[in-house]
Image (cartoon, rainbow, N blue to C red):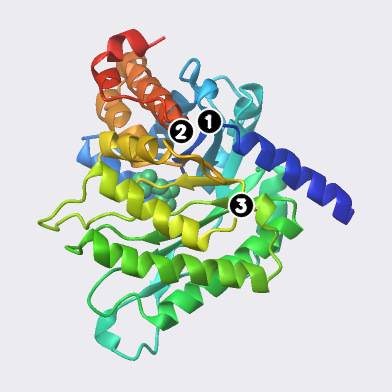
Amino acid sequence: MTANATVNELASTIKKLAIKGKGILAADESVPTITKRFQANGIESTEDSRRAYREMLVTTPGCNQFIAGIILFEETLNQTTSKGLLFPQLLNQLDILPGIKVDKGLIPLINLENPAQKEEITQGLDGLPERLADYKSKGARFAKWRAVYAISQNTPSTLAIQTNAEILARYAAICQQQGIVPIVEPEVLIDSDHTIARCEEVSGPVFHAVFEALYRHHVKLEYIVLKPSMVISGKTCAQKSSVQETADATLRILQQTVPSAVPTINFLSGGQTSLQATAHLNAMNQHVLPWNLSFSYARALQEDAMKIWAGKAENIPAAQAAFYKRAKLNSLAAKGEYTEMMEREAAALVA
Ligand code: 13P
């Protein structure tokens, strides 16, 4: 494929992903992660139950008004739906772009100055070009790679920040070479007692290092999706940041570190409640910004639907109504048009 054809492919994919008011559904939980979430809801995790669950989400009538792309796990990419279509074929019929999680999960970062720190990096670069070519032949148009940063008194360390940035940039460069739009996901974890001020102090250097590495690796920022965590107080922090504080701090850090060449920023929800994730996105979209600001949530889109579905076919309409509601409200938040009142008008929102 010529360099021009590859750029055209990247341009056509990012154009669809960056449509105002549309977001991305992350349905790419690894088998251990989805199993944990299923178990918490009393659902057995088998290849078929995972297929049935994801088919239920994807076939929610009308969700393609709000969802531009869905990130799949490798297992799902190769699965056939009950109607005999492969998932990517079904998504194409619905005008939803198929994406694929390509990282191979976390491993310890060794030789830290303080070995008690226990930080992690993400693996999966070996053989990535060949895997991407295979995923692309099966219909994937964009990819996802997640790096994590835990906050403690001494972390993230400079070594973790630099190593993760380098790996994210290598991944992004390889994706673009293959005509696949990379989602670059630096996630500063919410699970600790840190204040919002500490999260802000950490997030600046993390995002800055990522963009410095992307620049050094000649990644075309016009054809990436940034999927960051929000700047927010930790889960067990006594002083919870308000919606306004979270929105202001997140925008401050993004404006300081993310070039305007990036077309779209799609947040992860990271353990926020569904309502918080929607409210934060909406508050940020009250401003005129250089990028599209939308969502790429897993839990904040799926939580209610999974609970209601509970592994039973008779619950599909109610579970799909719950998924439709969250997708629609987040779509409104991505345009700054959401109000909390809409949560109560749920019934009217369901198509
Ligand atoms: P959450 O929205 O549940 O954080 O998941 C997003 C994601 O894709 C994590 O990699």
Q: In front: 105, or 301? A: 301
Residue 349 is drawn in which quadrant?
A: top left
* 325 in relation to 177, above or below: above
Amino acid at dot 2: Ala
Left or right: 259 with respect to 37?
right
Disc number lying in front (3 or 1): 3
Circle 3 sits in a helix, a strand or a loop, which is it? loop
Left or right: 197 with respect to 225?
left
Residue 177 is drawn in which quadrant?
A: bottom right
Amino acid at dot 1: Lys
Tag 2–tag 1 contact (CB < 8 Å): yes
Measured from the top left, where is residue 1 in percent x and y? Answer: 87, 52
Q: Residue at x 19, y 54 (%)?
A: 235
Measured from the top left, where is residue 21 in percent x and y? Answer: 51, 29
* Ligand 1 lies under 8 Å from the Cβ of mark 1: no
**Crowding near pointer 1: few (<14 within 10 Å), some, many (20+)?**
many
Left or right: 82 with respect to 169?
left
Disc number lying in front (2 or 1): 2
Q: Label 2 belongs to which residue?
A: 334
Q: Label 1 belongs to which residue?
A: 22
Instruction: Say whether residue 44 is visible.
Output: yes
* 253 in relation to 34, above or below: below
